[in-house]
Image (cartoon, rainbow, N blue to C red):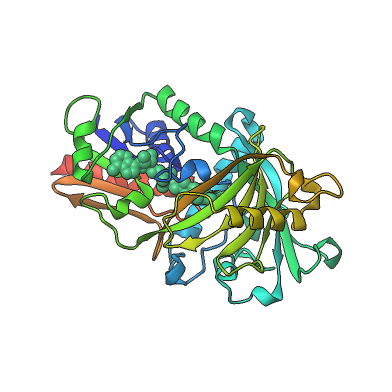
């Protein structure tokens, strides 16, 4: 039995630990500075919407950190959908439900940062139309005023406040030990295994913190700041648009979380911005844009004063120039498998990335046993 430390308890660390625990005979300790239940600017996962909008696989815009040519991103998204769909269909306790996603395009947004970010998502002939059910091009009659085109498909929305604890519980059920801890160097995590012995391997799932983590210090990482408003109001569908009239790094999206999780109104993608506090003017613009696109959010005749706010939030997406990093290497004599840099797509790539991390863990442990 090999001993493994998974560093990080966001969606990446929890899904990887679960994947390893389900399919192997390893003794696993998951160590993290932040755990499900915490809300912190260094912990992206609780702030996510979170839904499945495949969009970046074929994009090549390094400045905004999207998938490079031939990146693993598309494979991860394809391999994640079946599990999210299975959980939404068969396991209501997980906090994932199906929702129709409606994606609207304005001709005038062509070339803007948001339109580039959403480039694949906005296509009427999108590559993922064979992955998600019920993909269709919307007729003009179903477009809100000012929109030039749109598509819809069946997606999921995840209530992260239920889903992250559920992932942790599944890990515990399979014998994974969860501990709080902070590693300053990735190799030091090997000494955090619950057995007290040095672990055979460390899986690094520290998200944006891999920019600073000793032994990793990956300069390709940067924050993609996202600001949201969580409201009690309900939206009939999920909505996204190709841009807004409020600046090229601002966005409009709405998603209704499963099981009483409230409705997430977003947002923005502010590259390189570390600000942890919500900007009140941006919050007002977000709410106004959302009510404009989806007046059903509020009772007839009301504007944003009809929204019932649970909280304002800010999260930093762990953007990475190039792509998500799922790779193995030896650092200071310790076998390390990385799984970080999931940008704004950590949930929708989670199972695909964890499967690849699992493959690399098995390969590294075999190699270690052989030596
Ligand atoms: P994190 O969640 O940041 O977790 C990192 C973990 O590592 C934490 O437990 C932290 O404590 C731990 N850690 C870090 N450094 C150390 C250390 N030195 N020692 C010990 N522990 C350490 N994705 C989607 O798929 N769909 C969406 O709709 C979506 N919407 C989003 C909306 C917003 C506003 C934001 C901000 C993000 C959104 N995302 C979405 C992206 C998604 O949230 C991230 O990609 C994902 O949460 C990254 O998860 P992670 O586990 O890699 O990192």
Q: Nearer the viewer, residue 106 or 312?
A: 312
Q: Measured along the vertical axis of the image, is residue 120 above or below residue 82?
A: below
For the point 25% across and 46% down, the residue is 336
Residue closest to the eye, 303 or 76: 303
Residue 200 visible? The answer is: no
Up the image or down, 258 lies above or below 109; here it is above
Q: Where is residue 238 drawn, in percent x and y?
A: 70, 50
Quarter placement of the C terminus:
top left
Across the whole image, how many numbered discs are drawn on residues?
0
In percent of width and height, residue 284 lies at: 65, 54
Kindly identify the residue that appears in the image at 18 percent across and 25 percent down: 196
Res 83 quadrant in image: top right
Quarter of the image for residue 190 reads: top left
Position of residue 122 measured from the top left corner of the image (x, y, whole percent): 65, 66
Residue at 72 percent across and 44 percent down: it is 307
Left or right: where 49 falls relative to 25: right
The one of 264 and 282 positioned closer to us in this rendering: 282
Q: Quadrant of the N terminus?
A: top left
- Could you say where residue 180 lies in the image, as x and y percent from the top left? 32, 30
Q: Residue at x 25, y 25 (%)?
A: 194
Q: Is residue 141 above or below residue 34?
A: below
Q: Nearer the viewer, residue 19 or 99?
A: 99
| Visible residue check, residue 192 | yes
> Taking 169 as reference, is 3 left or right?
left
């Amino acid at each position: 039995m090999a001993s493994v430390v998974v560093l990080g308890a966001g969606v990446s660390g929890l899904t990887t630990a679960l994947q390893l625990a389900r399919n192997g005979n390893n003794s696993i300790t998951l160590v993290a500075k932040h755990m499900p239940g915490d809300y912190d600017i260094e912990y992206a996962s609780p702030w996510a919407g979170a839904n499945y909008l495949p969009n970046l696989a074929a994009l090549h815009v390094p400045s905004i950190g999207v998938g490079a040519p031939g990146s693993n991103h598309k494979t991860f998204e394809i391999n994640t959908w079946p599990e999210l769909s299975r959980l939404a269909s068969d396991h209501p306790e997980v906090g994932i439900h199906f929702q129709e996603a409606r994606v609207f395009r304005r001709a005038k947004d062509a070339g803007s940062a948001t339109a580039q970010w959403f480039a694949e998502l906005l296509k009427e002939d999108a590559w993922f139309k064979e992955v998600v059910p019920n993909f269709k091009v919307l007729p003009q009659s179903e477009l809100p005023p000012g929109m030039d085109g749109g598509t819809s498909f069946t997606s999921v929305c995840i209530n992260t406040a239920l889903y992250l604890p559920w992932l942790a519980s599944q890990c515990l059920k399979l014998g994974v030990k969860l501990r709080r801890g902070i590693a300053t160097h990735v190799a030091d995590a090997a000494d955090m295994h619950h057995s007290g012995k040095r672990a055979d391997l460390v899986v690094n799932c520290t998200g944006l913190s891999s920019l600073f983590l000793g032994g990793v210090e990956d300069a390709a990482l940067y924050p993609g700041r996202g600001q949201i408003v969580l409201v009690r109001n309900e939206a009939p569908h999920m909505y996204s648009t190709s841009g807004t009239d409020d600046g090229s790094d601002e966005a409009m999206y709405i998603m209704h979380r499963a099981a009483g999780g409230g409705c997430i109104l977003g947002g923005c993608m502010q590259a390189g911005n570390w600000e942890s506090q919500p900007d009140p003017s941006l919050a007002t613009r977000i709410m106004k844009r959302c009510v404009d696109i989806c007046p059903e959010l509020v009772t007839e005749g009301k504007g944003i004063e009809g929204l019932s706010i649970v909280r304002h939030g800010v999260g930093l997406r762990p953007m990475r120039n190039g792509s998500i990093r799922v790779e193995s290497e030896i650092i200071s004599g310790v076998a390390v498998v990385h799984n970080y840099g999931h940008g704004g797509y950590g949930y929708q790539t989670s199972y695909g990335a964890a499967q690849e991390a699992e493959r690399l863990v098995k390969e590294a442990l075999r190699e270690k046993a052989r030596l």
